[in-house]
Image (cartoon, rainbow, N blue to C red):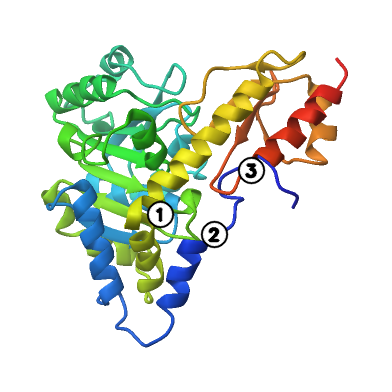
Amino acid sequence: MKRGFGSDNHAGVHPRILQSILDANTEHAPAYGTDEWTERAVTEFKNQFGKEAQVFFVFNGTAANVTALRAMARPWQSVFCSDVAHINVDECGSPEFLSGCKLLPLPSHNGKLSVDELEKAFIRRGDQHYSQTQVLSLTQPTELGTAYSVDEMKSLIAWAKSKKLLVHIDGARLSNAALYLKKTFKEITTDLGVDVVSFGGTKNGLMMGEAVVILNKDLAQDFKYIRKQSAQLPSKTRFIACQFEAYFKDGLWQQIAEHSHHMALYLYEQCKGLAGVTVREVPQSNAVFATIPSHWVKPLREHYFFYVWDENTFECRWMTSWDTQKSDIDGFVALLKEQRL
């Protein structure tokens, strides 16, 4: 595959992350998370999210979301999420199949849920014929690259708590949101009353691995059994944990998020005003959404891969990553300028 803007998943492994794997590969170590790398990585997570945080490593983002929801909801309960949420449209029904709970997708604006929509959907409490809502799942930043402000999060979480709902954050790109909001991870999760975070690594320069960060101690008690039953307990956990240790060390996570955001801003600025290109809005993370003529897609993809987000309007998603260079963007923009309307 040529270099492109398809996904931050397409980028390779950051050199410092890769080195951490090599460094962890020099000796034997206990299995199943009882090693020193896992211990140090968990300490780093506690530094970031608060000392009460409990951390469980899994293989991928879908697993993080599914195991989190299994811990939060029973099979007869339901989960509010946005209509464009990853758990709703990109996980092949895994949350419902593996947790038994029902997803209730609600209309969103720029990827965001609103209290008004939640209030309208919060119905039939105590009705034995209706799945009882137990969890509010928010994606931060959203699938459209927008970041909930702290005030927006406070409002949504306050509403959820008033209804005795638990709050889950799909944080596959939470680092990008923290960078954009100029807040710590603790300030946008723990301090706001979030119960569980699916914390992303793969999209942020790791080879593989995500973390389920449980901030509500009542939900952590049985999670080790849920993880094992879900086939998500890595025997050589140290090779996931060491990556997160390196990710947090010396602010690497901030450097990666800042670079990918700056590249998205540069791409936005270069595309803004181009004939035939309609850019949605200023990037708040590492995503640029732009509508282009349908006949441009094939010739552009021959040089730089990307996804068509909406096949009706031909709005496209262009993602930047830790290794995106200005030369990548300059080459892509030059091709855009060559296209005919």
Q: CA distance from mark 1 to mark 2?
A: 20 Å
Quarter containing the C terminus: top right
Please name the residue that numbered disc 3 is placed on: 325
| Residue at the image point whose x is 38% and y is 76% from the top | 236
Q: Are marks 2 and 3 in contact (CB under 8 Å)?
A: no
Q: CA distance from mark 2 to mark 3?
A: 15 Å
- x and y percent of residue 53 in the render? 17, 52
- x and y percent of residue 221 in the render? 14, 58
Q: Amino acid at mark 1?
A: Ala
- Residue in front for this viewpoint, 336 or 240: 336
Circle nearer the N terminus (1, 2):
2
- x and y percent of residue 206 in the render? 47, 58
Circle nearer the N terminus (3, 1):
1
Corner quadrant of residue 308: top right
Q: Which numbered circle lies on residue 329?
A: none
Circle nearer the N terminus (2, 3):
2
- Indicate left or right for 23 with 328 as reference: left
Q: Amino acid at mark 3?
A: Gln
Neighbours of disc 1 within 10 Å: few (<14), some (14-19), many (20+): many
User: For the view shown, which residue lies furthest in the bottom direction?
Assistant: 28
Nearer the observer: mark 1 or 2; the answer is: 2
- Indicate left or right for 197 with 158 as reference: right
Please name the residue that numbered disc 1 is placed on: 63
Tag 3 secondary structure: loop
Tag 1 secondary structure: helix
| Residue at the image point whose x is 25% and y is 55% from the top | 45
Tag 2 secondary structure: loop
Neighbours of disc 2 within 10 Å: few (<14), some (14-19), many (20+): many
Q: Which numbered circle lies on residue 13?
A: 2
Nearer the observer: mark 2 or 3; the answer is: 3
